[in-house]
Image (cartoon, rainbow, N blue to C red):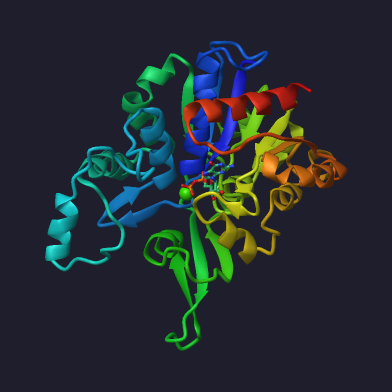
């Protein structure tokens, strides 16, 4: 196997990629060349414009994580961050104050916004930013592709007793960051998704892959949005590569994040097998050939297998890079089996 393509969200996807790259570099993946190329197709539906800047949280989380610039405690944004701009904006009374942009991080958004203003598509902007962040891993052939160059934004409908209609629609980031996903999500609407076009290289990355991996990213607002870009599901259906996913639900809950709220809002059972069945077997119009779930959920293996998806239970907690590398190795083994 030489070409591995990963459909990634932010934190869950980035951590998995760290483990995958470590596993490749240390020769832990059976049948995978030491110079294997990894293409990351990243969700861009979390993107937002704020204070005049274009912010792409999932692209940046992947970029900073793989480039060793991430704040390891928060799991997003830059390490050794300072917050002077945020404080100054708050002193001016500028809204919104709930979305924190750190000073170092702002440099990324300035470069991105200027390039977009100059007419470059997001894919080219991302490539330019990655020259800095992925330079050490480029030798390993890592590419980061936005799922689309088009503007696509996830919005969440929530109950709001103070609104005349009793409901309100907020940007995904407002739901996640300001409301901390503490109120139920009634509906998830991904504005612009149906009319979007896959970014340059996205469909080829799936079609030409030797292995496609769905990391333990949010199945609705990360992987779900990538799958919703017209053409992506068709490419997955047609690729000769096996498609293997890793469960983001362990023991009936997300480890961190908000997969639970999102799955509930679209009526999918919050369990490792529930997510597998939601993705569906490739042999039956879905996207999966194989599925890894955590050992605590081993009792659900039969349910997944019965749906036509090869399934194995292995530890799936990304506690450190070694544990995560072992998850990547298990995914490769399942793909080969
Ligand atoms: P986001 O864009 O930052 O929300 O990140 P992703 O969509 O890539 O991943 C978020 C999801 O990762 C969460 O909803 C969790 O379900 C999952 N997750 C986080 N940590 C772990 C872990 O250690 N193991 C597993 N199996 N899933 C995890
Ligand atoms: Ca995200």
Q: Is residue 274 left or right of residue 42?
A: right
Q: Nearer the viewer, residue 119 or 306?
A: 306
Work out whether 60 lies above or below 166.
above
**Residue shown at 55%/68% (left/top)?**
185
> Vertically, is 257 above or below 90?
above
Q: Residue furthest front?
A: 296
Q: Position of residue 171 (x, y in %)?
A: 43, 63
Measured as percent of width and height from the top left, residue 54 is found at 33, 49
Q: Where is the N terminus found, in terms of image quarters?
A: top right
Q: Residue at x 47, y 23 (%)?
A: 142
Quarter-of-image position of residue 301: top right
For this orientation, the residue located farthest to the bottom is 164
The answer to whether one can see residue 171 in this image is yes
Q: Nearer the viewer, residue 245 or 57?
A: 245
**Is 130 left or right of 104, judged from the image as shown?**
right
Give the percent coordinates (x, y) of residue 256. 50, 50
Left or right: 199, with 284 as reference point: left
- The answer to whether residue 241 is seen in the rendering is no
Picture layout, residue 59 above or below residue 241: below
Q: Is residue 244 above or below residue 224?
A: above
43 and 310: which is toward the camera: 310
- Where, by quadrant of the figure, is residue 213 drawn? top right
The tally of labels here is 0
Q: Which is more toward the observer, 229 or 319?
A: 319
Where residue 46 appears, as percent x and y from the top left, is 45, 52
Residue 67, image quadrant: top left
The image quadrant where one finds the C terminus is top right
Give the residue drawn at x 25%, y 63%.
97
Asked if residue 254 lies left or right of residue 181, the reply is: right
């Amino acid at each position: 196997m030489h070409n591995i393509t990963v459909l990634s969200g932010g934190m869950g996807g980035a951590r998995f990629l760290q483990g995958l790259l470590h596993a490749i570099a240390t020769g832990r993946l059976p049948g995978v060349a030491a110079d294997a190329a990894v293409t990351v197709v990243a969700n861009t539906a979390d993107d937002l414009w704020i204070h005049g800047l274009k912010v792409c949280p999932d692209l940046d989380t992947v970029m900073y994580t793989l480039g060793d610039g991430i704040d390891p405690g928060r799991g997003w944004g830059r390490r050794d961050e300072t917050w002077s701009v945020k404080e100054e904006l708050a002193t001016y009374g500028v809204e919104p104050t709930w979305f924190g942009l750190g000073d170092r991080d702002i440099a990324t958004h300035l470069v991105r916004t200027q390039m977009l203003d100059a007419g470059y598509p997001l894919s080219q902007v991302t490539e330019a930013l990655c020259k800095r962040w992925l330079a050490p891993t480029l030798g390993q052939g890592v590419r980061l592709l936005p799922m689309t160059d088009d503007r696509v934004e996830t919005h969440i409908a929530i109950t709001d007793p103070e609104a005349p209609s009793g409901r309100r629609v907020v940007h995904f980031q407002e739901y996640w960051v300001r409301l901390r996903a503490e109120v139920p999500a009634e509906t998830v609407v991904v504005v612009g998704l149906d009319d979007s076009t896959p970014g340059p290289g996205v469909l080829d990355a799936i079609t030409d892959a030797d292995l496609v991996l769905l990391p333990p990213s949010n199945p609705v607002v990360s992987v779900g949005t990538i799958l919703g870009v017209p053409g992506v599901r068709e490419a997955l259906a047609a690729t000769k590569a096996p498609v293997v996913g890793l469960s983001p639900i362990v023991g009936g809950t997300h480890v961190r994040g908000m997969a639970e709220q999102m799955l509930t809002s679209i009526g999918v059972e919050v369990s490792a097998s529930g997510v597998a069945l939601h993705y569906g077997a490739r042999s039956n119009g879905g996207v999966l050939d194989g599925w890894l779930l955590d050992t605590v959920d081993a009792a659900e293996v039969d349910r997944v297998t019965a749906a036509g998806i090869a399934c194995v239970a292995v530890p799936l907690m990304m506690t450190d890079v070694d544990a995560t590398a072992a998850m990547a190795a298990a995914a490769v083994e399942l793909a080969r089996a």
